[in-house]
Amino acid sequence: FRVIAVDQRGHGLTDRPDSDYTLDEVCRDLAALLDTLGFEQPLLVGHSWGANVALQFAADYPERLRGLALVDGGMTEISASSSWEEAEKMMRPPDIDGVPVERFLGFARNFPHMQGVWSPRIQEMLLSNFLIEDGKVYRRLTIENHMKVARAIYGQKPGRIYSRVRCPVLLVPASREPVSEQEKAWQRLRDEGIKKALEMLPGARLRAMENTPHDIPVFRPEHLASAIVEFAEGLG
């Protein structure tokens, strides 16, 4: 396979414009990238926000994809159970700009889903998401722009666009025992979305990652890669 990992705007070393970060905007980014790299009907894989973007792209450009894999994203209609004011509070990230690296890592090691699995590899992966200057941590994506992304995710209604997707779809949700009432509510909403996706998406297949938190690529990379390769090989 020819594999390209995409850093969307505001992420990695990609430009960080103060734009609107709408799904239409980032889907145009993706279309331009595929044109530039000469991809014809690729399998598009997205995780989290990337899954929302991938789903939107599959609906807006149905003829351009051979397959679609949604990794713990693109399956939940948040607006079905929460107002934007409520969702905004839940989706707002902590303001960590300027926090010393060691203090930040101390917090990170004690996150509920990190306990018992922390390793030098996970630490390296976590820090790669941030800018490190003078021993302090800074976000690559500003909170203001992060919340634009959150607003776009909130406004997307997956159940209303599934019917526009024409390619086979692999659903890879994370599944584990909820550690809070908020997480329990999110999982109920996500499960409802999975049921609707399986009913509406063409040839949809479900490959849940058991006992795994949201960051499947971090915690189950081999299993995720295996699921994607198996799906890709079946696309012909």
Image: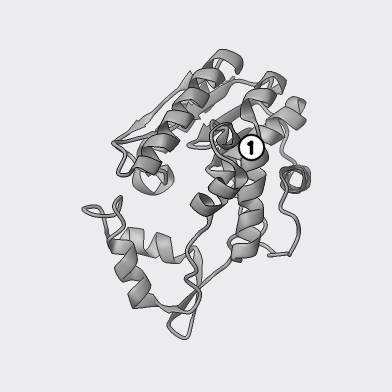
For the C terminus, the quadrant is top right
Residue under the image location 65 percent in, 48 percent down: 151
Going by the image, does 35 lie left or right of 217? right
* Furthest residue in direction bottom, as rendered: 134
User: Image quadrant of residue 114?
Assistant: bottom left
Give the total number of marks visible in the rendering. Answer: 1
Q: What is the x, y in percent for residue 47?
A: 52, 42
Residue under the image location 67 percent in, 40 percent down: 155
Task: For residue 59, say whether it is visible.
Answer: yes
Residue under the image location 77 percent in, 48 percent down: 25
Task: For residue 172, say whether it is visible.
Answer: no
Nearest the camera: 229 or 28?
A: 28
Residue 82 in the image: above or below residue 227: below
Q: Which residue is mark 1?
A: 54
Going by the image, does 90 lie left or right of 107? right
Going by the image, does 151 lie left or right of 135? right
Going by the image, does 16 lie left or right of 134? right
User: Image quadrant of residue 159?
Assistant: top right
Residue under the image location 65 percent in, 26 percent down: 66
For the N terminus, the quadrant is top right
Q: What is the x, y in percent for residue 27?
A: 73, 43
**Amino acid type of the residue tagged 1 in the rendering:** Ala
Nearest the camera: 159 or 49?
A: 159
Q: What is the x, y in percent for residue 215?
A: 42, 46
User: Image quadrant of residue 76?
Assistant: top right
Q: What is the x, y in percent for residue 3?
A: 57, 43
Residue 148 in the image: above or below residue 17: above
Badge 1 density bin: few <14, some 14–19, many ≥20, Cα 10 Å:
many
* Furthest residue in direction left, as rendered: 116
Q: Secondary structure at mark 1?
A: helix
